[in-house]
Amino acid sequence: MAVVETRKLTKVFKKAEEGAVNDVDLVTRDGEFLVFLGPSGSGKSTLLRMIAGLEEPTRGDVLIGGDVVTDLPPRARGIAMVFQSYALYPHLSVEQNIGFPLKAHGVPKPKRRERVDWAASLLGIQHLLARKPRELSGGERQRVALARALVREPTVFLLDEPLSNLDAKLRASAREELTSFHKRVRTTTIYVTHDQVEAMSMGDRIVVLNKGIVRQIGTPHEVYDEPADTFVATFLGSPPMNLVEDTDFIAGFRPESVVPAEMVRGPSAPIRLRIRLVEFLGSERILHGVIDGGRFDGRKVVSRVATAASGGLGEGAAHDFAVPASEVKFFDRATGKRAAPRELSWR
Ligand code: ADP
Ligand code: MG
């Protein structure tokens, strides 16, 4: 059964000219980790808040477990939500913080204790139960907030950028923890982020949003390798996909598909690049070049090459590269949408 489903879900805020969320149709799969990914202002939080019941839709419906819940209040939806700015009660212990939602629902103390122990052990914070929030690190506070959301055994977990207050190193470990936590509990989870690395590493599937419109729903592989349009192609990947405009189409290929010519086997498009700038990133180098000669002379192209294979590729010189034919994607110039493969002549 679909745990969460939206049907033509739309939100137009008062005085706004365009909808913050427009006609969103999506269906979660039982137990999956679904990520909403998009730039700031793309409607991710508004969409999540409508699913939670915190924002009233302008049109459309939300279904949970097959039932329409559009007019039900948040507490009647069987969901738990963790926000970017989760607030713990400073004067309560960790144990009391986690147990708070149960106490508010009149759950008796022995049962409460049992549920708190269960949630705390899932998140590995049993040893912190007696502490106050100020005695915890950022990552530990994050886990307490998650335990508090988990303690009522929600049917759906809604997380809105829960890691964005952590520093880069903590984020990486929190990401891993959240993923392994999800593998243990298998609660259907919707996770909002603007960070493509989080989306790619954590999501079973990714919903890519722009301007309140779903651009693509797919596995990390699908959205990366088979982007539905030029927005998805350039939003995912760092550096983004190269896009070269021709008269009636756009050809796209990822920086890692632009490889020194001598390393390519099989059908490929030769491309001569004059390298303007080399960025050294340790295991690999980012080469910023322009096409040298042919129909696309002067267009910028970025290549990403393993440092071990980039020996002779210095700034200033022109070098022969090639793009394997199967790695060139085509897009319609007018709409930006994916188009059928075709012959590409570079000469
Ligand atoms: P995201 O979470 O992807 O950054 P939001 O869902 O917060 O995006 O916002 C989507 C759009 O809706 C933005 O243009 C934002 O300014 C607008 N918006 C969000 N909340 C409100 C509100 N309460 N009133 C008016 N406009 C809002
Ligand atoms: Mg947001």
Image: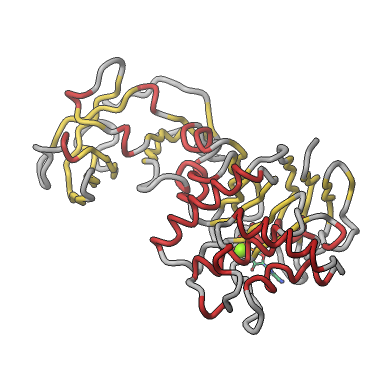
**Relative to residue 300, is residue 138 depicted above or below?**
below
Q: Is residue 23 left or right of residue 318?
A: right
Query: Where in the figure is residue 68, as x and y percent of width and height?
Result: 89, 48
Residue at horizontal 39 percent and vertical 41 percent from the top: 241
Residue 306's image quarter?
A: top left
Q: Which residue ends up furthest to the top in the rendered image?
A: 266
Total of numbered circles in the picture? 0
Q: Is residue 73 left or right of residue 207?
A: right
Depth check: 19 or 207 in front? 207
* Quadrant location, the C terminus: top left
Residue 95's image quarter?
A: bottom right
Query: Where in the figure is residue 268, as x and y percent of width and height?
Result: 30, 21
Q: Which residue ends up furthest to the front in the rendered image?
A: 110
Q: Is residue 131 left or right of residue 51?
A: left
**Relative to residue 303, is residue 170 depicted above or below?**
below
**Relative to residue 238, is residue 312 depicted above or below?**
above
**Relative to residue 179, is residue 221 depicted above or below?**
above
Q: Quadrant of ligand 2?
A: bottom right
Observer able to see residue 68: yes
* Quadrant location, the N terminus: top right
Depth check: 345 or 115 in front? 115
Query: Where in the figure is residue 195, as x and y percent of width and height?
Result: 49, 55
Q: Which colour scheme is used?
A: secondary structure
Query: Where in the figure is residue 283, as x and y percent of width and height?
Result: 22, 44
Residue at horizontal 18 percent and vertical 40 percent from the top: 307
